Every structure is written in structure tokens, then in C-alpha cells.
Amino acid sequence: MSTLQTHTSYPMDEKYNFTAIEKKWQKAWNDSNVFATPKPSEQHPKRYILNMFPYPSGHLHMGHVRALTIGDVLARYARAQGLSVLHPMGFDSFGLPAENAAMKDGVSPEIRTPQNIASMKQQIEQLGISYDWSKEIITSSKTYYLWNQWLFLKFLKAGLIYRRESTVNFCTHCNTVLANEQVEDGQCWRCSNSIIYKKIPEWAFKITQFADDLLDGLADLNLWSDRITSMQRTWIGRSLGAQIKFTIAHDPTQSIDVFTTRADTLMGVTFISIAPDHQLAQTLITPVQKEQAFAFIEQMAKTDKIERIKEGGNKQGVFTGSYCIHPVTKNHVPIWLANFVLSDYGTGAVMGVPAHDARDFEFAHQYQLPLQVVIQKSDKENADATHLTKAMTEPGILINSSIFNGLDSEQAKTKIISFLTDNNLGQAKTTYHLRDWGFSRQRYWGTPIPIIHCKEHGAVPVRETDLPVELPAFERVQLTGTGTAPLSSVAEFVNTTCPECGAKATREIETMDTFVDSAWYFFRYLEPQLNTAPFNYDTARTWLPMDIYIGGPEHAVAHLLYFRFFTRALYQLGLSPIQEPAKQLITQGMVLAYSYKCTEHGYLKPAERTESKEQETVFYCVPCMQMQKKTRLLVQMEKMSKSKHNGVDPQAICQDYGADTARMYMLFAAPVDKDLEYQDRAVEGVSRFLARLYRLYMHHAPKIKHTPIYQAKSNQITLTDTDNELRKILHKTIKRVTESIEKLNLNVNVAAFMELCNEAYKLNVHLPECSIQPAILKEFFIYFSQILAPYAPHLAEELFGLSGGQGFIQDSPWPRYDEQAIIEDTLTIAVQINGKLRGELKVSAEASSEDIFMAASAHEKIKPYLDNKTINKKIYVKNKLLSIVVT
């Protein structure tokens, strides 16, 4: 235990100087290295608590403050519980923002990134976050990305990485390829620019090889929110069904394969729809349909995929002129090109069953295609396609289905798939929405891919002994912003020799997506200085999986899916002892604030808007008013954003109110998983509470500092009623705060602290001549500071020392509440007469059921309901309710 003696004595009228207190304790923590990670033991089990690391933009935002504070409360609480806590932090420092900024102003990412990291570290330390900075990782450092390259080689050797040509999502603003998980509603996840599609070669991880494992593993993640696991299930999208072969009528050597989860509707197929860029599309177009069909293909090539398949979108198509053969009926079925079918999803072809599929119904209705009802809800129902106003999508009994008539849908699926398999016309198949993860990017600021291209030997892995393949200096690179890989402009980087034959060769000029950096970084925190491997297996076995992982829900699919995949892949390769990275996931809500938007000028800064007091507050656009307009502003609550000019600078809050105020407000304003609406007045309220609490301590610090603390078991003094009352509210609060932290109800504890302070004032604790005995006051002040510490660590540390606490507060054990102290002396008993509440009684906790009945009989509100009545029954629910039945 530390024995720091740096607690300052203040005069009684000294104000709460949060700046001096916070700087003092931040320096003391840093000088004493109090947050160093101890080795776990049987007596002190491990607790690995990790926040998702930020991109080093140079500035924290309020979302960072909220997430980091949540993690710090849990880390400080775990230490006080006697656990060995690993609580590290690092920076996700590769990526587009630094590269785009470099193109804009010419400042090298190699210069800007360290500056931004230093700035953000200073802000994090200003908040008093208890990180072990000896564990820091920076993904753009050679000592980190060396292991990205090392893992690439391991994955490549194991067949988990391959080269492919693929149609990719491309953001013209960021000038880079995006993975499917980085596209949100047809827009770039980072800049919200609409994407286009390009066909290029790329490197990809075989994440689909782990689709079943990733899906089935979600069942074990019972400390992850249903929202997150549901999103991952949807994205992986496992579908059980059949792949069915429809032979081309004019060329029996070729066929169109379709996948369906509704094999029971096979006999209702009246057309086949294929993607406009399906591999057979152009060969199926007959001369008569050529002009119309090729124009449609060209139109679809220019149309956004998301737009084509969105729900409610217009269904468009063109008949190819060709037919295929139904595998069972042998009828000719027309083949159509359709905008809602994508070549890279499923087989690129869909069987049209308009009577039993809403999308097909809409398409058939638009192009006057026939409907065939093959399922009805019961065998007594008279189903008629001519009267359908919408598709019948529910399962039921098969009709008009030849040998399958009378089967229910589930039976029919099995029978039809067996028939198709036996006749070589199809087979049972499982498909997935998940696609392999394309991770190569045409940009500079990322991990170089360790591949050398040789004319003789193709793509050759770099030798492990030649790692890292270093990024060339920024000044050697031409960042054109055209989408061309910048590394291609550096001849001395590109030109090399083949490791196999020594002939002239070229290096791979693409770099890795930053999601690779974050897919395994939690392993590296264990021993970031290790230079023989990315991490040590035995160390990983000691600390992993993470106990608590904290971050935003916006990472539900991409990052959280990728780091689960990496963990399972590393396990398969024998490198990792675990298959799932984190036991518990905490996803905090967003921080919201009012934004002000003019229809002409967009989002406005506070200085660009004004308000007038009429019947209600109305905001006007100043630029408009200067042009003789009086445009009211659209005022709405939105996520804090610099672009919307509604952001609040965390550093400004720390300067004006203190870091402890910023921390407590972010925890107080909303439950952890709910969005938080930022309000200035509430911040001021928290600040006033901390100042009031400080003053409460200052009244008694000198006289209790050297007083022995009250020990209930030794019972060395006789307690007064006031002593007991103060102990009761204190120990009730300890119990409440402890249980709330365990349940992650962190916001309710700030209210508990305020209530405890208020109750102390009611008992005159704030008065110098208060009657409470010094030993009881000492217990109150020491324990209060200890339960406050995870929330407001600087002030708690100060108050702990002023009250006579020894060493750092984090080295003192979490206080246990005294069960005897919180036993109620009186109880409130509800009294019912014939089932209706007629009153409440205040009775002694020692009162018997008969005592309580006698009290009820004499109670002025209850007595009238008992007078002149026959009492048939009395039921007493201990400590809660007396129910009396009368006639």
C-alpha cells in the first residue's frame, strides 16, 4: 500500500479549488505509478477492462468522455474490490483522416499523429482516467504494424487470405474501398458520401469459413446486449434452403441455379428473375429483346445497389426472350432481368413465386405475369389466384402441387428437396449474407501488405526475417486523391527482388484496412514491448478473455464481427487460448445536443443565430436577417458533431467546472446504454454539489483526521440516536451504490451521493458544533470518499486524506455496509379492508401481528371500516401488509 502524505490543510473558509486539487492528484498518481497492472493471483483475480481505442484526432469529444468515464468507474471499483486490474489505452492511429488531412494541408501523418496523440493523452489524463500507460499501443508504429504483417503471413499460409477480383464499394470522397460493413444505407460510414462500385483485384480474409462458428458463438455471449447479437445474426444471415437447377430451354447444357428458403412454393414458380449482370444474362437475350434488354443492363450498372433493393423501391425488369424448364412440371418458365436481383448475393437468380412472395407479387402485377396459388391456410380453404390482392406468405397446406398435395409446408420442404436431390435437379444448401472481408486499400497511411509480385512466381510472401515492410517517408509519396495507390509513386519502395528467385519484382502497393489493426489489438495490450511475438500464449491465457469491453453501438457489425473472427482464427491456428474476445460488452448511448439549422445556410454556430423572447423562444438566422430576411431556425436534438456546430469541448468543461464535474455529469445524465441529452444547467448543478460536499468535509477535517474510525464490532462507544441515524443513511447508501455499480446502473449513484449529502446536512453535520461523535464522523467521511472515488476520483482522494485516510484511496478496500446499521426501527404497513387500501400505519419493527391489528383498530382513518363489523379473517404479510376481511 502506498503511504503518500501530500494532503494539504486548507483554512476553514477555503473554496473548492478543483483546479489545484485535480492537478495535484494527477501528478501524484503519475509520479507513484499507482495504476500499474499487478500480476493476478488466487487472492487477487484478474479483471481486464477495456475501452475501444480512439482515432487520434487531437481532441476528445463528449462521446469519448462518456465511454472512458464508464470504463474508469468499473476499473476503480474493481481495484477497490481487491482485483488485479488491467486497464490500458492506445490509439487507432492509421487511417483516412490523417491521409486526407495530409492531402489538404501537406502536413505528414508522421508529424501530425504524434502531436494529436500527445494532445489526447493530456486530455485523458486531465479527466483522471486510471490507465496503465506502460501498456500503450499506437497502431501506426513499426512495433505494432510489424505484427499485422506477421499475422498476415500466418493467415495466408493457413489459407485464410486470398487474392480475388471483386466489385467493391468505393467512396469518391475518401478515395478508398469500403468493406460491406462500412457502407450504411449506400453511404460511406465515415463521411456519408454516396458510394459507387468498381471492379478491382483485392486481398480478402475468408471470414465466411467461420460463419457458423460466429453465428453459433453468439448464444454464449449472454452478457452482450440482444440488440448487438441480433444485428450480428442478421448480418451473418444464415439461411437454410435448397439450390434448384432450372435448365435453359434452348440449351440443355446450361442451367440457372436459384436458392430458396421456400422449397414448398416450387410448384408456384411462374417466372425466373436474374441479375442484369448475371454471367448468362447476355447469352439469354434474344434478338427481339436486344435493344430493350441491353439498355436496361446499362441503366442498372449506373444505379446504386442499395437503391435497387430497398424496401418499397420500384420493381423494374425486362424479359430476355428466353425460357427455362421447371424441374418438376417441365413447363417453360420465362426468364426476366430484374433490378432487385444482385449478382453477388446468393446465385444471382431468384425463382418468381408471385402468389407467395410480396416482391414477386409486385413485379408480376407490374408486368402482367401469371400467379399460381400452391399454398392455402387449411385444406378447407378455397384459394383462387384471381382474387389475390397481396401475396400469401404464410406457411400452410400444399395445393396444385402434384404429388406434394396435402403436405404442410415443413413436410413439403423435406419431400421436395429429397425429390430434387434424387433426380439431380437440386440439393439442400445453406447460404449466408456474410461475405469474405476485403481488406486491401488504395491508400498510404496504413500497414503495407507483405507481398512481392514476381513474373515467374506470382504473389510471393515476404520472409518473416524481412519484416517489417516499412512505409516510405511521407515526402516521398504522391497523394493525388484519385484513388490510385499512393505507394506506387515511390520507386525505391516498389522495386525489389523476388524472395524465391532473386529476379526483379515489385512490392504490393496496397495497405491494410484499419479494421485489421483493431481486430487483435486487445491481445497486444498484454505485453506491448514483446519483440518476439505479437503476444505470449501463456499471458493471454492468464488475462483473456476480456471481462468488460466498452464502446459505441455503431461498431456492432464491422469491428465487433471482425475481432470475433480474428480471435477464432487465431485459436484455430493455435496462437490463442480463447475463441471469444470479451465476456461482457457495454455499448453506451450517444451524446446529443441541440443543433440549429437554416434552410439556406445549413447548420449555424451560436454566434450566427439569435433569439427573441415572444410567447416562446424563437431562434433566427443572423445571416438571413442581414439580408432583410427573418428565417426561423430548425431546432432539433442530434448527435454532437463539429459539422453541426453543437459540440461541447470537454476541455472547456474541465477548465470551468473541473474534471470530476465532467465525469459525474456524464454518468448522471442518463443510464449507460441510453442517449444522453447534454444540458448546461445540469453540469452546473453537479458542480455545486461537489463544492457543497467539499465544504461539508472542511468543517470537520481538522478534528477527525487523527480520530480512530468507528468499528461496529468492537462497539467502543455508546451511540446516540443521531449517530445511529447518520450510520443508517451512510450504510444504506453504501449498499445502494455497490449494487448499482454491479448492475451497471451508474447514473442512479450520483443521485445517491446527493441524497446522502442532503441527509447529512439535515442532521447538522455541516455545523462545527454538531453533536455526532468524532469516530462516527470519521466513518462517514472516510466511507463517503471511498464510494465517491470511482466517480469523482480527485475530490475523493483529497477528502479521504483530509479525513485521515492513509495512502491512496484506490489502495483502500471498498467499504462493506453494516447490515445491523440499516435495520429499520419502524415499518410502514399498508392496511386493506376487504381488498381496498384504507390507510397506512407506522409501527415498531418489533411489533407483532396482533400489535399491528390493535394499532389499525385505533387508527382514525381505519377504525370506521371496522366499527360494528364482524371480522372474518386477518392476513398479515410480514413488514408489508395487513389485510382484514369483514362483514
Image (cartoon, rainbow, N blue to C red):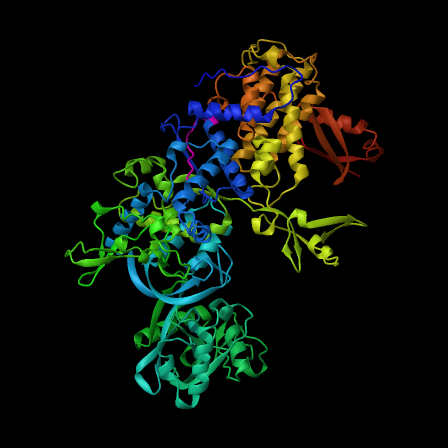
What residue is shown at x 33% (from left), y 77% (from top)?
A: 425
Residue 482 appears in view = yes
In front here: 495 or 24? 495
Image position, residue 793 (x, y; %)? 53, 27
566 or 116: which is nearer to us? 116
Image coords of residue 327 (percent x, y) = 36, 80
- For the C terminus, give its image quadrant: top right
Is 385 above or below relative to 77? below
Figure quadrant of residue 424: bottom left
Position above or below: 793 against 640: above
Number of marks in picture: 0
Which residue is nearer to you in this view: 729 or 642?
642
Viewed as shown, does residue 422 lie left or right of 228? Answer: left
What span is in magenta? Answer: 80-91
Q: Is residue 81 magenta?
A: yes
Residue 800 lies, in percent from the top left, at 55, 20
Quadrant for residue 276, please give it: bottom left
